[in-house]
Amino acid sequence: MKIGYIYIVAAAVIFSTMEIAGRLLGHSLNATQINFWRFFISSSVLLPMTIKSLRKRHIRLNINDLLYFLMAGFIGIFIAMEFYQVALVYTKASVIAIIVCSNPVVTIPFACLFLHEEFTKTTALSFALCIIGILFILNPLQINADGVGVGLGIASAIAFALYSVIGMRRARRYGAISFICLSFVSGTMMTLLVIGLSSLCPPDWSASGLLGQFSHIPLIRGLNGQNILGLLYFGVVGTSISYLLYFKGMEETSASTGSVAFFIKPALAPILAFLLLGEEIPVNVLVG
């Protein structure tokens, strides 16, 4: 059980760097392009371990398994992470980080409903204190953010919460590595399909705001030595390692406990932004 908490805290630390990395990459690459390469790299890293794990467990995937991973990839990668990456184009990274961190508000009720996890007094107290902390940090009465970005961030948080619960339903059977990798593979394939179809979009979409993000999406164009290093960090450390820690933490504890990683992140993300980007930490963030 104790090792599970260590996994969760470690995942939270890595998750706290993601908006900074995503925002920096977004200056030179398309959001969907980033999403594709992020999960392609991560899938490639995890695939050999996945094959070994499935053989060790004597699991042969059938049509129901494949449909399950297609559903998980669609919700967790194609929807949640696509919306997340596009949201970073429209809104500050710090705002999106805090909005995404609200996903336990959905994860914990989902876990109680679908996984029949107990909602203890300790969980309720932690839940309430964390909500209060996030409200202090977000400061909703004075927030200045684009409505499109906020809406996409909220949708991403809800989708990721559902992905977490879906993963816990069968992760113990497949193992965390296999679930993560195969959902990544299916999500990556869907993203590649969108990139291919984007060339069919009308030319006027390119200059039409949100629709322009999905028009004539490049696959290779824009890649250079600097952003390739960023994508490698995003794919290997920020995705492969962080997701493994997150789901291993939930395996050792519970989905409700694992979701606490997203309550730790709002406290860490502003500190990392201050250290790495020189962003000021307001008083309300310190209180939160």
Image (cartoon, rainbow, N blue to C red):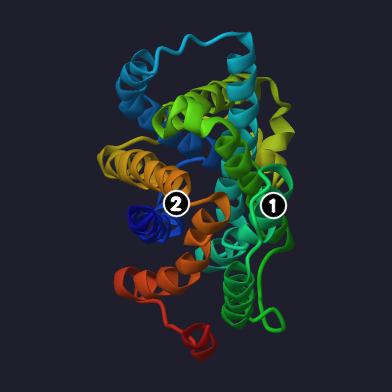
Q: From the viewer's perspective, is 268 left or right of 232?
A: right
* Residue 286 placement, left or right of 162: left
In the rendered image, residue 248, in percent from the top left (x then y), is placed at: 40, 43
Where is 241 relative to 59, above or below? below
Residue 22's disc is 2
Left or right for 151, reference 16: right
Give the percent coordinates (x, y) of residue 105: 67, 61
- Residue placed at 36% from the left, 76% from the top? 274
Among the 4 quarters of the image, the one containing residue 123: bottom right
Kindly indicate the quadrant of the structure image that contains residue 151. Answer: bottom right
Marks 1 and 2: which is nearer the front? Answer: 1
Q: Residue at x 71, y 40 (%)?
A: 211
Residue 152 in view here: no
Give the position of the N terminus as an image quadrant: bottom left
- Disc 2 element: helix
Q: CA distance from mark 1 to mark 2?
A: 32 Å
Identity, as a three-letter code, of the amino acid under mark 1: Cys
In the foreground, 90 or 61 = 61
In the rendering, which numbered label is found on residue 120?
none
Q: Residues within 10 Å of mark 2 (few under 14, many from 20)?
A: many
- Compare marks 1 and 2 and give the one earlier in the sequence: 2
Name the residue carrying label 1: 112
136, above or below 1, in the image: below
Q: Secondary structure at mark 1?
A: helix
Is 38 left or right of 260, judged from the image as shown?
left
Given the image, on which type of amino acid does mark 2 rest? Gly
In the displayed structure, 271 sits above or below 57; it is: below
Looking at this view, is 2 or 157 the one in front?
A: 2
Dot 1 surroundings within 10 Å: few (below 14), some, or many (20 or more)?
some
Can residue 207 be seen here? The reply is yes
- Position of residue 204 measured from the top left corner of the image (x, y, whole percent): 73, 34
For the image, the number of numbered tags is 2
